[in-house]
Amino acid sequence: MNNLTLNTGITIPIIGIGTNTFGKENKDFMGAINNDTSELESALNMGYTLIDTAIAYRNESVVALAIKRSGLKRESLFITSKIPGKPEYTDTDELVEKAILSSLKELDTDYIDLYLIHHPWDDKDGIVRVWKVLERYVEKGVLKAIGVSNFNVEQLTHLLANCTLKPAVNQIESHPGSWNDDIVDFCRINNINVEAWSPLKRIPETSLETLKKIGLKYGKTWAQIVLRYQIERNVIVIPKSHSTERQKENLDILEFNLSDEDKALIKTL
Ligand code: NDP
């Protein structure tokens, strides 16, 4: 697996597995937790090591169970979780601490590799206050790296001006039709790694056709072309699939290179 180095010095795999519908009835985000670990076990068995979960997904304990059943060592894995940007989790320092401790308990681990603020909210100074609690947990060695998600340039600028530890990652929506290149460029300049959520979703039909045509040249699918484009520009991808076949497909993107011409075309999609 290829890795990138975060601004903390720790490494992060460039491909991970999204999990927001794993372990749930009807593969539905809102579905009841059914403790089905087969999807994540399948991904872990084939070599995914970065797992993306969140308190909001309600499946941190399913992630823990899948890891246990896989037999893999904790240190061989990179776990990301997220604290919701909601008052019931962020209004006081004690609530933030409670969320971190809850994630640790649910994930059955004594450290989390990357912990993100899931969404920004209007109170920029409130975000800084929450950030300072997360910073304390980095000092304690409980959170190995901290970051944000869905932050725009303005929100990042305010945090950067007021933090001690820079966010290591900004996890944002990024795919054809919504690349969010302004945020990607800002993060690159500021040494913040970008992770793309929903890397394969909401892609306009015309862009899909173009991606399929490009794929024919490389013997790759449209999904592999999109994911390859992102990792070639050092954007981490966390595609999610319930199918073992497509999980394999999404991982099989490390051994080809897109031409400059094709990358220029994909950038316009
Ligand atoms: P993805 O972009 O990963 O797309 C998932 C969909 O694409 C599924 O329907 C899946 O179907 C299908 N799919 C997967 N691989 C392929 C393939 N090779 N070819 C064709 N179809 C494919 O969407 P997600 O919304 O799940 O995003 C990924 C992860 O990002 C989430 O699981 C979550 O961890 C994170 N996320 C974070 C957010 C945030 O606010 N920070 C917001 C949203 C997501 P099938 O299962 O049948 O293969």
Image (tube, grey):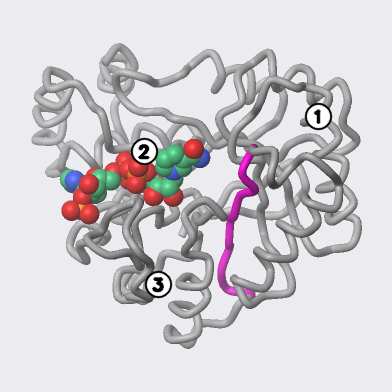
| Residue 140 located left or right of residue 228 | right
Single out the residue that lies furthest toward the front: 88
| Residue 78 located left or right of residue 58 | right
Q: Residue, x 20% and y 62% (percent of image)? A: 243
Q: Earlier in the sequence, mark 3 or mark 1?
A: 3
Task: Label 1: state its secondary structure.
Answer: helix
Task: Label 3: state its secondary structure.
Answer: helix
| Residue 249 located left or right of residue 16 | left
Q: Amino acid at mark 1?
A: Gly
Q: Position of residue 2 (x, y in %)?
A: 49, 54
The residue indicated by pointer 1 is 126
User: Mark 2 packing: few (<14 Cα in 10 Å), some, or many (20+)?
Assistant: some
Q: Amino acid at mark 2?
A: Ser
Along the line of sight, the residue nearer the viewer: 83 or 250: 83
Q: Residue, x 60% and y 19% (percent of image)? A: 152
In reply to whether residue 6 is colored magenta, the answer given is no
Q: Quadrant of residue 211?
A: top left
Task: Label 2: state its secondary structure.
Answer: loop
In reply to whether residue 78 is colored magenta, the answer given is yes
Foreground label between 3 and 2: 2
Magenta stretch: give its range.
75-85
The residue indicated by pointer 2 is 198
Q: Amino acid at mark 3?
A: Leu
- Mark 2 lies within 8 Å of ligand 1 (Cβ measured): yes
Along the line of sight, the residue nearer the viewer: 190 or 198: 198
Instruction: Identify the disc placed on residue 44.
Output: 3
Instruction: Identify the disc placed on residue 101.
Output: none
184 relative to 170, above or below: above
- Distance from label 3 to label 2 (Cα)? 20 Å
